[in-house]
Image (spheres, rainbow, N blue to C red):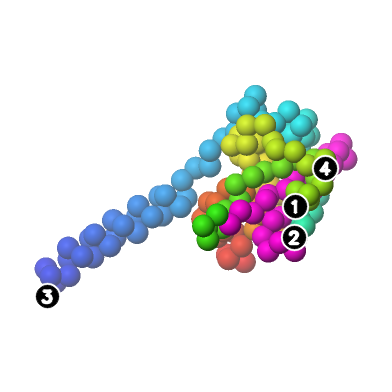
Amino acid sequence: MIRILAKPLVILGILIAVLLVWVFRPYEKADIAMVDPRLRTFEEPCRQVIVHYFGDFGSMGIELIDSRDQRFEFCLRISRDKGVVAYKELLIGSTDYTDKNASKVINEHHTRLRLAEILRTMPEDDDRRDEFLYCLCGRLRDALRIFKR
């Protein structure tokens, strides 16, 4: 009986180990030279984060206030292509994608990484900020921040 269960248990153990390694893999670092120039001027530490939700059932806005009281506004626009919900577009300049000041960020990948780095340094727990962080990066590790409280 033990020999029959040994192989499936070993395989299950290996799968769980691989899943844990994948979930808790190190975060990718942003190349500051590739980050949108408007975010490069952000001076840490971040003093305040304000998250906004919109009536389109998904788009989110966020305001960051840095140590010099500069305000940085971003919007994650939701997309529902073929029934798949995704946050494919990051805008800067406004928390609302319909605002004329909102524009696409330059080099979105590294800008997203830098924005995530800033949000992860915030000391206090905030479900709304962590939800924005999860939508920004899609990392299960960031979703666990919400559920572990």
What residue would you read off at disc 2? 53
Q: Is residue 8 left or right of residue 95?
A: left
Dot 2 crowding, Cα within 10 Å, few <14, some 14–19, many 20+? some
What residue would you read off at disc 1? 61
What residue lies at 55% left-to-right and 54% top-to-bottom?
A: 81
How far is disc 1 from disc 2 in space, using C-alphas?
6 Å
- Identify the secondary structure beneath mark 1: strand
Identified by mark 4, the residue type is Lys
Where does the image place residue 62, in percent across and percent down from the top left?
76, 50
Q: Is residue 68 magenta?
A: yes
Find out whether the residues at labels 1 and 2 contact each other: C-beta distance under 8 Å. yes
**Numbered badge on residue 109:** none
- Identify the secondary structure beneath mark 4: loop
Of the numbered discs 4 and 2, the one sitting upstream in the chain is 2
Q: Quadrant of the C terminus?
A: bottom right
Identified by mark 3, the residue type is Met
Magenta stretch in the rendered image: 54-80
Dot 1 crowding, Cα within 10 Å, few <14, some 14–19, many 20+? many
- Identify the secondary structure beneath mark 2: strand
Along the viewing direction, whichever of 95 and 148 lies nearer the viewer:
95
